[in-house]
Image (cartoon, helix red, strand yellow):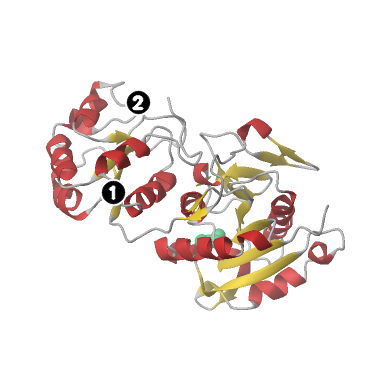
Amino acid sequence: MDNTKKVLIIYTGGTIGMKNTSMGYKPAPGFLKEAVEAIYDMSRPDFPAWELVELDPLLDSSDMAYREWNKIASVIYENYNDYAGFVVLHGTDTMAYTASALSFILDGLDKPVILTGSQIPLSELRSDGRDNLVTSVMIAAECVVREVALYFSGKLLRGNRAMKMSADGLVAFDSPNYPHLAEVGINVKYNAPALYRTKKKAISFCPFSEVPIGVIKVFPGIQFGLFEEIMAEKLSGIVLETFGAGNIPGGGSELLPIIKKAFASGSVITVCSQCPSGTVTLGAYHASALLKQAGAVSGFDMTTEASVAKLYHLFSLGISKDEIKRLMETDIAGELTEL
Ligand code: ASP
């Protein structure tokens, strides 16, 4: 291992550095640093050089939103030339959202940014945080993966394809619609054809603005009329989580006029699937055929997490609604498989 390649570890909050209090787990300033310094591997001479910064305030990741995503990205952007790679220690609950957001905010990224965390705090027995941290730093220093990725329990995943799959299992993440970037056992086995390479010449920082985004999950018996006001007047970007390949109850008869109205007022409605794996194919069934006609776009095999982040990104660019619609159906950071 070339330990001249320095890695910047950014602690944002999350279980990995949390302390157990009378009111449950909470991040505490300085607490993670102590636990990290106690890990023998982190100070071995053959381990990559690293530095740790802690964000203020440290958060449970359920409190993270676009401002925090911008802040994490700005720390990476401002330190981009001084480090070989970056490790972002983050709560698991919304890690897939942050990973997706960073993949859009850091346009043209050509270095490793590895998000990780743990289900058991580093300071406790049997913490999964030790391997997650040590391996993430090694992967970040190696620079084989040059994109936003998420490492957890032996799997390296593309950040904007990842999903949290388990609330209490240690194998908590997967990317059902994209091959793993690496499998980590005795060795790190990279999956070279799956790795993303930017075509951009340089990195640029594209922060998100405050955009009214909503996710609506379709369920049997949904009364779309109840959502008319928020869809047509309040939200700009809407992710519609539909059944299977993009189907909605009633073939869209109740929803279509709402979509048309929402579209006319500048909203973009993206159709995703509630199934973790597979793709949306608008028109495969009568139950989805009219959605596209009304102006909705297909999210194909994008996760809801990536779709939300992509809507923030595209609306923040200040481009036209037609361009947003076109780009929602186009792969721009490895987040979607174009048919
Ligand atoms: N609630 C915690 C968080 O997301 C859970 C975790 O880190 O595992 O910050």
Does residue 169 appear left or right of residue 69 in this picture?
right
Q: Position of residue 291 (x, y in %)?
A: 23, 31
Q: Secondary structure at mark 1?
A: strand
> Relative to 286, does residue 189 appear above or below in the rendering?
below
The front one of 63 and 198 is 198
Instruction: Point out the frontmost of discs 2 and 1.
Output: 1
Q: Which residue is under mark 2? A: 281
The front one of 124 and 160 is 160
Disc 2 to disc 1: CB gap under 8 Å? no
> Relative to 90, does residue 157 appear above or below in the rendering?
above
| Badge 2 amino acid | Thr
Q: Which residue is under mark 1? A: 237
Q: Residue at x 64, y 60 (%)?
A: 81
Residue 119 falls in image quadrant: bottom right
Name the disc covering residue 20, or none.
Answer: none
Q: Residue at x 74, y 57 (%)?
A: 134
Question: For the C terminus, which image quadrant?
Answer: top left
The front one of 64 and 124 is 64
Q: CA distance from mark 2 to mark 1?
A: 20 Å
Q: Secondary structure at mark 2?
A: loop
Does residue 41 appear left or right of residue 63 in this picture?
right
Mark 1 crowdedness (10 Å alpha carbons): few <14, some 14-19, many ≥20: many
